[in-house]
Image: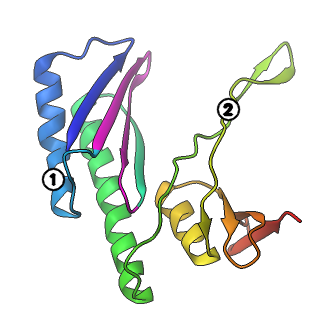
């Protein structure tokens, strides 16, 4: 696995990179990774602490974790634990469903809104490619990413659909005709 460690508002030293890489290598035992898999780590410094974002796009799914902590190394440990939990959950679900692959997942960045002069404005736009899959795969991908919704192309009718978590539990489905 290739590692890319980038700092924002903080200089990432070689020592920090090597420690972060060593901590993330624990994840390699959970799944087969090739030389082409790239683990991206973004470290941001704020007044109240550091935010560590780890993204690992694989053939099976895109794993992603964000952790806010006062200490960078503690934050990396927490991110590794979140990613390991995602992998364990996916493996258990795959065993229950007896499926070999979950399909390719595109990481969806959440659209962030910023208040400015008491007026909300759109601050980010993201274009995605939707994958052809069934509802179970879409729910699995949404859960693994930790998102509240997931956009996909339904394999039954080839329409665009959105699956989402309902506030009172369960899932909702919006289909486009």
Residue closer to the observer: 52 or 122:
122
Image: 93 above or below 25: below
Tally the numbered discs.
2
Assign a secondary structure to mark 2: loop
Q: Which residues are magenta?
A: 38-60
Q: Quadrant of the N terminus?
A: top left
Residue 120 belongs to the span the image colors magenta? no
Dominant secondary structure, magenta: strand
Query: Quarter of the image holding residue 9?
Result: top left
Residue at 62% x, 75% y is 134
Residue at the disc numbered 2: 112
Assign a secondary structure to mark 1: helix
Q: How is the image coloured?
A: rainbow
Crowding at dot 2, Cα within 10 Å, few <14 / some 14-19 / many 20+, comes out as few
Disc ID at residue 75: none
Describe residue 9's horizontal placement relative to residue 38 as left or right.
right
Image: 106 above or below 116: below
Q: Are marks 1 and 2 in contact (CB under 8 Å)?
A: no
Describe residue 139's horizontal placement relative to residue 5 as left or right.
right
Residue at the disc numbered 1: 26
């Amino acid at each position: 696995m290739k590692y890319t460690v980038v700092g924002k508002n903080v200089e990432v030293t070689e020592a920090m990179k090597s420690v972060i890489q060593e901590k993330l290598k624990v994840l390699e035992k959970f799944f087969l990774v090739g030389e082409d898999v790239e683990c991206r780590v973004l470290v941001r410094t704020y007044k109240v602490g550091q935010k560590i974002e780890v993204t690992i796009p694989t053939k099976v799914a895109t794993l992603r974790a964000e952790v806010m902590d006062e200490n960078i190394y503690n934050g990396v440990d927490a991110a590794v634990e979140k990613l390991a939990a995602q992998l364990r959950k996916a493996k258990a679900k795959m065993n229950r469903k007896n499926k070999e692959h979950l399909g390719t997942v595109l990481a969806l960045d959440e659209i962030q809104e910023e208040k400015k002069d008491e007026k909300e404005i759109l601050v980010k736009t993201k274009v995605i490619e939707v994958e052809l899959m069934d509802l179970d795969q879409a729910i699995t991908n949404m859960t693994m990413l930790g998102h509240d919704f997931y956009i996909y192309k339904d394999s039954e009718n080839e329409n665009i659909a959105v699956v989402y978590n309902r506030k009172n539990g369960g899932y909702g489905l919006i289909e486009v005709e």
